[in-house]
Amino acid sequence: MKFNFRFIISVFILLYAIITLVFFNFYKELAIKDTKKEANSMLNNMNAIRTYIEEVQRPMIYNLMKDRETFDNYFNSKILSSTYISQYIYEKQLEKKELKYRYKLVATNPLNPIHKANAFEKQILEKFRNNEIKDYFSILEENGKSYFFIAKPIARNKPNCLMCHGNPQDAPKRLLAQYGNHSGFFEKVGDLRAMIYLKIAIADIISYHKSSFVTGGIAMFIVFILFIILIYIIYNKDKKLEDRKELLFEHQNRLAVMGSMIGNISHQWKQPLSHLSSILINIELLSERGKLTNDKVVSKVNDANTQITFMSNTINDFKNFFSPKDNNNSFRISDIVNQSIRLLQASLDRYSIKVKIDIEYDFTFVGSRNEFVQVFVNIINNAKDAFISNNIENRIISIKSFKHFDKTVISIQNNAGKINSLVFDKIFKPYFSTKDLSVATGIGLYICKVIVQRYKGTIQAKNLENGVIFEITFKS
Ligand SMILES: Nc1ncnc2c1ncn2[C@@H]1O[C@H](COP(=O)(O)OP(=O)(O)OP(=O)(O)O)[C@@H](O)[C@H]1O
Ligand SMILES: [Mg+2]
């Protein structure tokens, strides 16, 4: 099957767009997965730091603060609050990071109001409390922007947590002075006080991974261009081969036409030759009788010249038709029609075929005159064959050229009977013939199609009531 190069490229571009889209989506997924892994490990780190403070550091410091007075006076979140310390460490880490997350701890009952969970966060925290999930991940939509969101619960309350989060009466005075006694108290051992989360705009993740996106995109683009070049090379090779094949066919057809025309030439010369010989005999007779006057000589010579001119014209037509190089000529359609008829005159006469010509719109082409003559000769020869094989009495070929809206049409019609409907779809195919293959090759109409398409035209056949019409159409 033959495909149009433009069609192939369109399909390719579409495919490329789809692949690019899939590729970028895939890359985005990969980037998010990567970020998730990193965020997960950061949250684990935060929890590990918290655990260290709660299990190691805080008991040791409490141990040092032996009495209640020291405990009250020297309480400082900088050495005792796992939230404060982990937050501080996080910020130190962030300074060295390119991808800036927002880290936060949220609680329903926080000492510090900045840690108060909103409705959405509360929901997740509730799930953690009920042990429904161990961690939480989702892509959030906020004000038209997408966010990556990952949360983990902190460790459940240990007894030493309640030194600050139990009864406010037991809490260190400095803590009460700092946060008041409204919120953050009456926690129980084993309860889940808070969760920590990381949040980041997806756009930031993508721009952080921009270089891999760009490299991937460029690599794909190069591969795509290489593919296009490859397709183009293959297509061109194919087309060149196709063109060569067409040219070969065209020559083959012209050779066949030439063969049949040798007969035409001799036939076309028969009449003027016998006319010439009769003129010579006449001159001889007149001279024998001494009646060859000067006037008579002039008249006979003129007569002879007319015949010779006719012979010379026919031979010129044939010569022109068989000379291969005639590109970039500008010619009128009426000239082509007349030349074709002159070439075929002998056989049209022999088989009593009448040709009617009606050039309503005589337009000009630029290209090869002979190619066009070949089209007419092939179609007229086919009609001639049909007239003979169908034994038609009154043989008429009618050639018209006219404008039809924005199109220019040349029609060649005959009354030689219809084309068999069984073969109708195949007549323009190469090597298709219903004729005796010793005389026909079946490339006549194929060549017509190739030539017409070379001039951006179309050719089609239609069956009429008692004949066939071939229409050659050009967009003007
Ligand atoms: N005017 C016509 N009337 C009826 N049948 C036609 C006519 N023109 C073409 N055909 C059919 O189309 C077939 C293909 O025509 P085409 O000119 O391609 O090949 P061909 O005439 O058989 O052989 P070639 O032209 O190569 O000597 C013919 O064999 C004939 O069956
Ligand atoms: Mg033919």
Image (tube, helix red, strand yellow):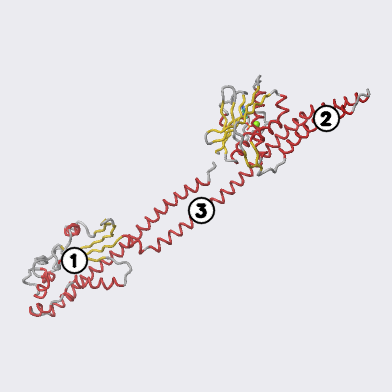
**In-front residue for pair 8/108:** 8
Residue at the spot of label 3:
227
Helix, strand, or loop for circle 1? loop
| Residue 107 % position (x, y) | 16, 63
Residue 352, by quadrant, is top right
In this view, the residue farthest toward the left is 169
Identified at 13% across, 70% down, the residue is: 161
Helix, strand, or loop for circle 2? helix
| Quadrant of the drawing holding the N terminus | top right
Q: CA distance from mark 3 to mark 2?
A: 70 Å
Ligand 1's image quarter is top right
Residue 382, by quadrant, is top right
Q: Nearer the viewer, mark 3 or mark 2?
A: 2
Say what amino acid the circle numbered 3 marks: Phe
Identified at 32% across, 70% down, the residue is: 97
Q: Is residue 436 left or right of residue 53?
A: right
Residue at the spot of label 1:
155
Residue at the spot of label 2:
304
Say what amino acid the circle numbered 1 marks: Ala
| Residue 194 % position (x, y) | 17, 64
Q: In the picture shown, does residue 398 fall above or below 326?
A: above
Helix, strand, or loop for circle 3? helix
Identified at 20% across, 65% down, the residue is: 105
